[in-house]
Amino acid sequence: MDQPKRYLITAALPYANGLKHIGHLAGAYLPADIYVRYLRAQKREVAFICGSDEHGTAIPIQAMKEGTTPRAIIDKYHALIKQNFADLGISFDIYHRTSEPIHHETSQEFFTYLNDRGELEVKETEQYYDEEAKTFLADRYIMGTCPVCGYQRAYGDQCENCGTSLSPDQLIHPHSTLSGKPPVKKNTKHWYLPLGKHEPFLREWILQQHKDDWRSTVVGQCKSWIDGGLQSRAVTRDLDWGIKVPLPDAAGKVLYVWFDAPIGYISATRQWGLDTGRDWKPYWYDKDTKLVHFIGKDNIVFHCIIFPIMLQLHGNILPENVPANEFMNLEGEKMSTSRGWKLDMQDYIDDFINKDNGGTQLADSLRYYLTLIAPETKDSEFIWKGFQDANNSELVAKFGNFVNRTFVLMHKLCNGKVPPLHKDRLDATDEEMMTAIGTTKTKVEQLLEGYRFREAQFEVIMLSDLANKYMQKKEPWIVARTLAETPENQQLIDNCLHICLQITANLAILINPFLPFTAKKMLHMMKVVEKMLDWENAGKLNLLSVGYSLRAPELLFRKIEDEEVKAQVDKLLASKAALAAPTTAPDQPVTETPAPGADTAAAKPTIVYDDFARLDLKVGTIVQAEKVAKADKLLKLLVDMGAEQRTIVSGIAQHFNPADIIGRQVVVVANLAPRKMKGIESNGMILMAEDKSGKLHFVSPGETIEAGSGVS
């Protein structure tokens, strides 16, 4: 394909049901951002589209866990995720929301268009129904024993213990997560997209047209799906939360999230057009637009099979490429929120960026390492020691060291100004170094055009390494010692540092798609405007004018210390241990009940520090309190924990009036497994003290502090 008139780049819409980890960042958003920054440097017309996926059962389930509403959940996590991306330099043109009216309108129009043209079929099927809750159950609202590994808390769509994809019918002893009762089968009507009808189109489009230019893992997974026989897939479901099906006979039904979520790319583009005054339609209807989806491999079927069928039927353009990445593991294990084995973007930002002066460079350190180990063709692994080595050995010792040495020597040996180039004094080493600049530019460009971001970044770092070796060979600091006897040797110093400064300017251009904060800092040191980062300037040897004064050097990166790495590994292990801790106490021998008011402290066994360390104690503020119906001892509390609000059921109703404790600060055991009490899921425990008379007292900080603060 010749260079298109415009580019439309999308990154998978993340679920707004919780924080996202670095595996998500490495899989879709960072490679997309690198590609977009390169396209912008090329002055190509591009729109970078993303946003929060705010429908589906994951949202109300999370709302139940946090004791709040689905709307509160999406508002909370949309804002957090959007800020996380900004902090790590992900430069969307728009980060939209599927809860916005324009998305509901776009999705309903899409559904109506397909339905009116007979592209959807209606079927009546039996699905699980909760008679007590009076609702059909989505897969995630059904739990039972996994038929593969025997795990007793497997969901109706997947066992999170062994990872097996399931259907509710496969579960042993299924029960509803809403009422706890076994569900029954009941007839319900839904609309389906007949995928099998479009198999010839998919075989031609994917297995013929794109068999050579798409990643083999993507083509292979598509072929497996197609060869296995494509089944009709429901586009509606029985659920309260979501986009209402725009038909009079579809009360209580919403569009299935897999159907409405990819349409979110279109609605976000529409909103971007409204925000910028641009015509959005050519981005989805003009064949001179190159559409590229950046996703993880778990989204291949949606972006390569299902959504393209929808786009073709709707008259839209099809994606030119879907460079899906594999998964990224963490310290030898698969990342898992439920097992506490993860590194959220927010955690990295808190521990490295917000706590560190010049922390934006540590955002680039993460971007660098994630690109270095990008799972482009196979699963990769984030290792904290590897992160430290990459930062210290490559960014600090190679790239940063070269730039710093160049500026220090320029100020010391050339009066802080760009020295002239004496062409009659150039030798073969100088010529080779200057040629390498243009060669690197060509390699990086070809690799970026082919979505090979890991190799492209490697070429940039290798240029800085080659430049270090060039400087070491020229030794201008040694030559400077001879100036008293041989003043013409200043020309050799000038040549070396002139070339090194032109390399520095080129490095800023070449590294900008990968490490944008670093490139911006280099521009500041060179006293040049951002226009210098235009790709057309890469490879040039006159980017910094002779005689131009440059600022004093600043370190581009700092070292990551051993203690920081150890702290992160310890934190990871502690999180895993806390979630793996037994949720019920082991059987204890029966003991004599102490008399009321007796000192019972000696009744509990001695523990070691590791036992205590498994507890996550945090300060919370009670924002709501009410009595639990038909339970004399229980209060239902809504507790502000800083980053979230939790519902906690506590047996303190006989000691406190609900209205009197609102605003009271308490200490909460924050990593206690959820437990249902009178049908209410309690997510934590309030610590209380009991005096000799049996009266309860709050355990709370001596003064008001920020909710969410740790207790140790």
Image: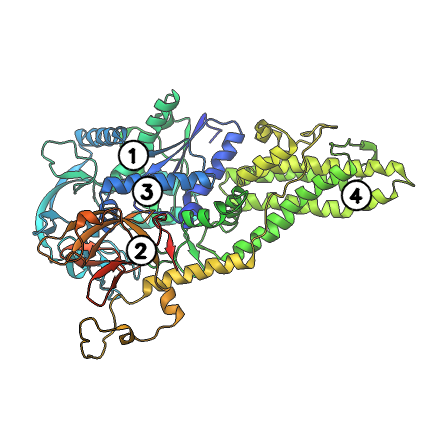
Of labels 4 and 1, the one closer to you? 4
Specify the amino acid type for callout 2.
Answer: Ser
Percent x, y of residue 184: 9, 54
- Structural distance between the alpha carbons of marks 2 and 3: 28 Å
Between tags 1 and 3, which lies in front?
3
Query: Where in the figure is residue 502, as x and y percent of width and height?
Result: 69, 35
Q: Is any atom of residue 213 visible in this view?
A: no
User: In the rendered structure, which amino acid carries the disc numbered 3?
Assistant: Tyr
Q: Earlier in the sequence, mark 3 or mark 4?
A: 3
Q: Nearer the viewer, mark 4 or mark 2?
A: 2
Q: Is residue 384 left or right of residue 155?
A: right
- Tell me how far mark 1 sits from mark 2, CA to CA: 49 Å
* Mark 4 or mark 1: whose residue is earlier in sequence: 1
Q: Which residue is denoted by mark 4 in the rendering?
A: 476
What secondary structure is found at the residue carrying circle 3? helix
Taking depth in this image into account, of 684 and 526 the one nearest to the observer is: 684
Q: Amino acid at mark 1?
A: Ile
Q: Residue at x 86, y 38 (%)?
A: 489
Question: Gap between marks 3 and 4, in whole Å?
Answer: 54 Å
Q: Is residue 408 above or below residue 274?
A: below
Mark 1 or mark 2: which comes first in sequence? 1
Q: Residue at x 77, y 47 (%)?
A: 473
* Real-space CA distance between mark 4 and mark 1, rounded to the nearest whole angstrom: 59 Å
First of labels 2, 3 by sequence position = 3
Q: Which residue is mark 3?
A: 77
Classify mark 1: residues with Cα within 10 Å, few (<14), some (14-19) or many (20+): many
Q: Left or right: 648 with respect to 201?
A: left
Residue most toward the right?
485
Mark 1 vs 3: CB contact within 8 A: no
Q: Nearer the viewer, residue 560 or 457?
A: 560
**Numbered label attached to residue 263:** 1
